[in-house]
Every structure is written in structure tokens, then in C-alpha cells.
Amino acid sequence: MILYKDGISHKPEDNLKRRCLSLIVYVLCGAFCLYSIIVYIKLKDRDLALAVFVYFLVLLGGFFLIRKNYQIKTLVHFYLIFDPLFAAFVMLYFWRYSAGTALWVLPIPVGAYVFLEKKYVYIYTLYVLLIVFFVTFLSKFLTHETLHFKETDFSDAIVGTANIIIVTILLYYNDKIKSVKIMANFVQDVNHNNISKLESEKNRNENKILKEDFSSNDKDIDKYNEIFQKVQSVVEEQFYFKDADFTTSRLSYLLKINNLYIAKSIKLNGYSSFSHYINSCRIQYVKELIDENDLSKITLMYIYTSSGFSSQSTFNRVFKQIEGITPTEYIYNLKKNTK
């Protein structure tokens, strides 16, 4: 994902979503503008015509002001929340004469499906149903009647046409967005495989150098022990192992020592790799926290995240590799021995 200075995402799929949202706003604005004219001329209601026209100006003006300064999700949520509220206002005017105005809220669940996560589809569908229920209930208490309101063919046609166009736009861009996502995932997988190959090649080269170094410079063991002491001072004494993103490159930078020398010093002290050493420090710290704390007051998640593990699956796998038993078994044995 690319973030510009304005903090806005410019991923291809987000650009498509912005384009889709722009088209929808333009269609809505055109529909509202025409709708206000029809209401004014055909239905002879100046107040409603003025309200619709003002909403058209606010929608169009507000969109141009904020479209480049907010994340796409913020724009979508703003539209999905406030557009049905205005639609409810219009629906109250016409509900007894035509249920066609309910089409104003038809695109809301579809928009949630295209732009947002699955849970929001259910949320906004419920939101729309509540609005329709509220309008149906409240319309029974309205006594204002206008003969012209019975001539709603033109207004219904505008509402239906506009919302069919909006749904079509949403479905069209939904396919395009899915295609872009699939392509992005494919490119990401290819890049990941390439990086893995490069890392594997790098590790083979490092191991080759280390083997040669072991065979020719065993007399420098004291030097490597000294390096390992420096490693311990950073990793263990300064608790850098608690950083889930801590790497051998970062350690090399802190110590101003070559990666290969650090790797050899770690291997000479009984660890198969940097990851093995870091994870051993983390597991040791986990055991200390378990021993020192009441597990009824703190969670295991707090313990392993505090120790540098980013996920429970990684923690469980590493713990069993190093200790030979699972964390649950370790805690059970600990409680059993303390009884």
C-alpha cells in the first residue's frame, strides 16, 4: 500500500473505489437536481423541492471538499449513514401515495458489500430495514395531504432509474475491484517467493563462509566469546528480545559487528541460529513470568506478547520445540508440583 503525504491510500483497488464513489455521487446529484425540479413543477411543493435542491448542493459541494482528504472507508460510511436519513425524510412525504421512494435506500446494502467488510453488509441492511419500519410507522400519524402527491409517476421513475444505475455501477466496479485484488495477491505471492529464494541463497552462502571460518580460525574462540557477551548485553540485559521485529541486522547495527561474526558467536555458544537464540531468551522470560505471576489475574496472551511473540501459534510452536511440551502442559505440571 502506498501512502502519500496526505496519509491517503493509493492502492489500485482504492483508486477504483474512489472512482466508483465519484460516479455514484454524480448520479445522485443529477437525480436530486431533476427530482427537485419535478417536485416543484409537477407536484407544486416548493418546500420539498427546496429541501431536495439544498441536499443536492450539500452532497456535491461536500464531496468535492472532502474527497481528497479522507480515507475511502470514511467517505463510504458517511454516505451510507446520512443518505438513508435524507431518503427517510423524502419517503415520509410520499409513503402513503407511493412506496417507490423506498428505492432510495436499495443501494445501501449493495454499497456496503462492495466497499466494506462483510459484517457491515448486515449492519447497514438492518439499518435500512429500521428506517423503512420507522417511516411506515410514522407515516400513519401524518395528516398533511396534497392532491398533487397522487401524481408520483415521474418521481418514481426518477428514483427507480437513478438507483438501478447506482446498483449497476456498484456491481460493475465490484468485479473490477475483485480482479485487481486477485492480481495484487498474485504479484505479492510471486515477490514473496522471490524473496524467499534470495534469503535461502544468502543463508547457504553464509553457512558456507561459517563452515570455512570454523575450520580455519578455531583459535579465535575467545574473540567469539567476547562477541557473544556483547550480544547478551544487548539482547538479554537490555531486553531487546521482547521486540517481535528484532533482527540480526538490527543487532549488527547496534553492536557495529558483522552479521557473520555474530552468527558464529551464537553457534559457538550452543544455538543453531539467531532465531533459536532469540526464541530461547523469550521462552525463558515466559517461564519467569509464569512462575512469578498469578495466572488467574493475567492472561497467557499478555505473557507471550510481553516476551516478544507476535502470535499464539508461533508461541506454542516455539515453546514445544524448546521445552518439549506445550505451554498448557508446562503450566499444568507447574501447578501440580506446587501443590
Image: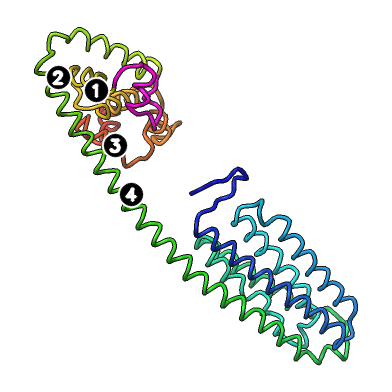
- Seen at 28% across and 47% down, the residue is 194
Is residue 209 located in the magenta-colored stretch of the structure?
no
Q: Earlier in the sequence, mark 3 or mark 2?
A: 2
Q: Earlier in the sequence, mark 1 or mark 2?
A: 2
Disc 3 versus disc 1: nearer the observer: 1
Hey, what amino acid is under mark 2? Asp
Relative height, residue 244 to residue 11 (above, below) = above
Q: Tell me how far mark 3 sits from mark 1, CA to CA.
A: 37 Å
Residue that numbered label 1 is attached to: 260
Residue that numbered label 2 is attached to: 213
Q: Secondary structure at mark 4?
A: helix
Is residue 251 located in the magenta-colored stretch of the structure?
yes
Q: Are marks 1 and 2 in contact (CB under 8 Å)?
A: yes
10 Å crowding of disc 2: few (<14), some (14-19), many (20+): some
Q: Earlier in the sequence, mark 1 or mark 4?
A: 4
- Seen at 17% across and 29% down, the residue is 207
Q: Secondary structure at mark 1?
A: helix
Q: Tell me how far mark 2 sits from mark 4, CA to CA.
A: 33 Å
Disc 3 versus disc 4: nearer the observer: 4
Residue numbers of the magenta segment: 239-258
Q: Which mark is residue 328?
A: 3
Q: Nearer the viewer, residue 149 or 256?
A: 256
Residue that numbered label 4 is attached to: 191
Q: Tell me how far mark 1 sits from mark 4, CA to CA.
A: 26 Å
Could you tell me which quadrant the C terminus lies in? top left
Hey, what amino acid is under mark 3? Thr
Relative height, residue 154 to residue 7 (above, below) = below
Q: Are marks 3 and 4 in contact (CB under 8 Å)?
A: no
